[in-house]
Amino acid sequence: MLILPAHAWGTAGDSTGAAAARALVLVASVLLFRAGAEGAAAWAAVRALLAGVWRASSGVEGINSVLRMQQARHRRLTQGLLDLKRLYWNCHAFRTGQRKRQSPYGRLGVPLPELSWWEILKLSPEKLRHRLPPPPPAEPLQELSPRDVAA
């Protein structure tokens, strides 16, 4: 049987919307249970799909908290200053936590030279290109037949 936390689905509380959400979760649970193995497989597929999904609001709230702190220091937060701060933030390695000694760019697989953000900023575009690894070869384009396009 499905066991879902109430706060995850907006089903907590006494409002009409919360009651409707609880009813929807109950109906979905019953349908999946009655579907047997196929329902369990569908539920497993949905859970696997949602396992890698992050709540966008958490990331946005984190960025906003950093920006608010910067706005308190700099009355005029220009686009150029934001770009500098973004480069610093994405190049710096975390000191603690799960991401210790990893930078946001590193976690994304962005190939950067082993330099500080300030040293990277001082490089000319040509020097930076020479320090970066060559890009991976592009996959050949697949020819599409008229039948493929119509489908």
Image (spheres, helix red, strand yellow):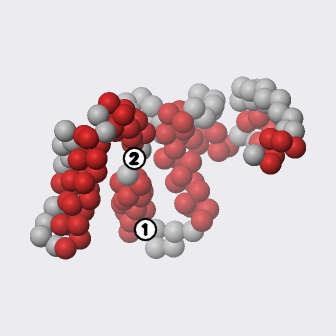
The residue positioned 38% from the left and 65% from the top of the image is 68
**Mark 1 and mark 2 in contact (Cβ < 8 Å)?**
no
Q: Quadrant of residue 98?
A: top left
Which residue carries the number 2 mark? 54
Number of numbered discs visible in the structure rendering: 2
**Image spot of residue 59 (x, y percent):** 40, 53
Q: Would residue 98 appear left or right of 17 to someone viewing this image?
A: right
The type of residue carrying mark 2 is Trp
Describe residue 19's horizontal placement relative to residue 135 as left or right. left
**Camera-nearest residue between 49 and 102:** 49
**Between disc 2 and disc 1, whose residue precedes?**
2
Whole-percent x, y for residue 4 in the image = 21, 46
- Compared to 106, does 68 lie above or below? below
**Helix, strand or loop under label 1:** helix
Q: Position of residue 136 (x, y in %)?
A: 74, 26
Which class describes the residues within 10 Å of circle 1: few (<14), some (14-19), or many (20+)? Answer: few
- On the rendered image, what quadrant is the N terminus found in? top left
In three-dimensional space, the C-alpha distance between marks 2 and 1, rounded to whole angstroms, equals 27 Å
Identify which amino acid the numbered label 1 is placed on: Gln
- Disc assigned to residue 90: none
The residue labelled by disc 1 is 71
* Residue nearest the viewer, comparing 133 with 117: 133
Residue depth check, mark 2 versus mark 1: number of the one nearer the observer = 2
Picture coordinates of residue 14, whole percent (x, y)? 12, 70
Image quadrant in which you'd find residue 105: top right
Q: Element at badge 2? A: loop
Residue drawn at x 76%, y 42% is 124
Q: Residue at x 60, y 35 (%)?
A: 110
Asked if residue 140 is positioned above or below residue 23 in the image, the reply reads above
